[in-house]
Image (cartoon, rainbow, N blue to C red):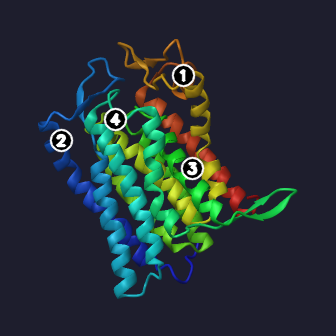
Amino acid sequence: MELQPDMSAASVALVFLGSFLLTYFITPIMIRRIGSRGLTGRDMNKLDKQEIPEMGGISIMLGLSLGIISAIFISTYTGFLRLDLTVVLASFLTILLVGFIGVIDDLIGWKKGIRQWQHALFPLFAAFPLMAINAGTTTISVPLFGTFSLGILYSLILVPIGITGASNAFNMLAGFNGLEAGLGVIIVSTLSLIAALYGKPEALVIGVAVVGALLAFLRYNWFPAKVFGGDSLTMMIGASIATISIVGNMEKVGVAIISLYWLELLFKARHRFQSESFGIPQKDGTLAPDPLGGSLTHVMMSLGRFTEQTVVLNFLALQLLISVVVFLMFYFKLF
């Protein structure tokens, strides 16, 4: 693959490194500080239910910030990256605002945090920066019916729906060591690759910065996890996926690539959003599904005697397959 003329490979690599390195080195510090203040959560898929420091999403926010700032610096002072800085800054602000909402939820506490209706409402405000700059394309194509222009309705309706929908969707399929960050790496990497092919530098640098931070975080979040991401992580990943899809004008790709989350939504809705994704730890190290169900994870666990690691790897493999199919559909212009 060859990057578009306005996307220097070296510059994109610097954005990745800035995000990766800061997250990698600051996460251990955050783990110690957060743990010493008692901001922990129980590892529900372990027999001992050990308390693990959470709010690791803050490390992601910091790493992402350095990555984006690096991209802005390169664009402003070197010209190796030609970016629309208004779009980059608006996108960055939207992602950070959603992450901040997640931090508030983490601070209040699991099951005592932001209510479901608040989860749906608050990210709407985070979408204001993208709405203000009229990000994305206002035209949509519908098979058999042609192309339609939505005008201002795109910014006023579809953008906030996309941000709040994706932020909350990514928060549903979670609770396993490395699952959220791992799925985020695969999804955002696919969107970043498409942005590179499509010539969307703003979407590319945002995606690369997110991937860099997530990969570094996985070093500490992989089984056995030393830190949890919390809602600050899951909501921010969802917001990043929606933002990249909007500014990269690849909304159809964004909707298709989170197919697992659409399925999870159906399971959660059937249980009135009261079900959890956790398994029931067994003495042999495997996980048994909740007899009441309520999540794709329970379907997975019912197929065999899987450890937590195996469950996570199976979901990562499923997401990788979905991402490959979506990429090929895009490449062959089926979107």
Q: Which residue is mark 1?
A: 294
Residue 76 relative to residue 304: left or right: left
Q: Which residue is mark 4?
A: 223
Q: Quadrant of the N terminus?
A: bottom right
Residue 333 relative to residue 213: left or right: right
Q: Residue at x 88, y 56 (%)?
A: 144
Kind of residue indicated by mark 2: Ile
Kind of residue indicated by mark 1: Gly
Work out whether mark 2 precedes mark 1 in sequence or the reverse, and give the earlier one. Answer: 2
Label 1 to label 4: alpha-carbon separation: 24 Å
Residue 36 relative to residue 18: left or right: left
Camera-nearest residue between 32 and 251: 251
Percent x, y of residue 243: 51, 59
Q: Secondary structure at mark 2?
A: helix
Q: Which residue is mark 2?
A: 34
Q: Which residue is mark 3?
A: 161
Relative to 144, is 88 above or below? below
Mark 1 crowd level (few <14, some 14–19, many ≥20, 10 Å Cα): many
Label 2 to label 4: alpha-carbon separation: 19 Å
Q: Residue at x 63, y 46 (%)?
A: 322
Kind of residue indicated by mark 4: Phe
Mark 3 crowd level (few <14, some 14–19, many ≥20, 10 Å Cα): some
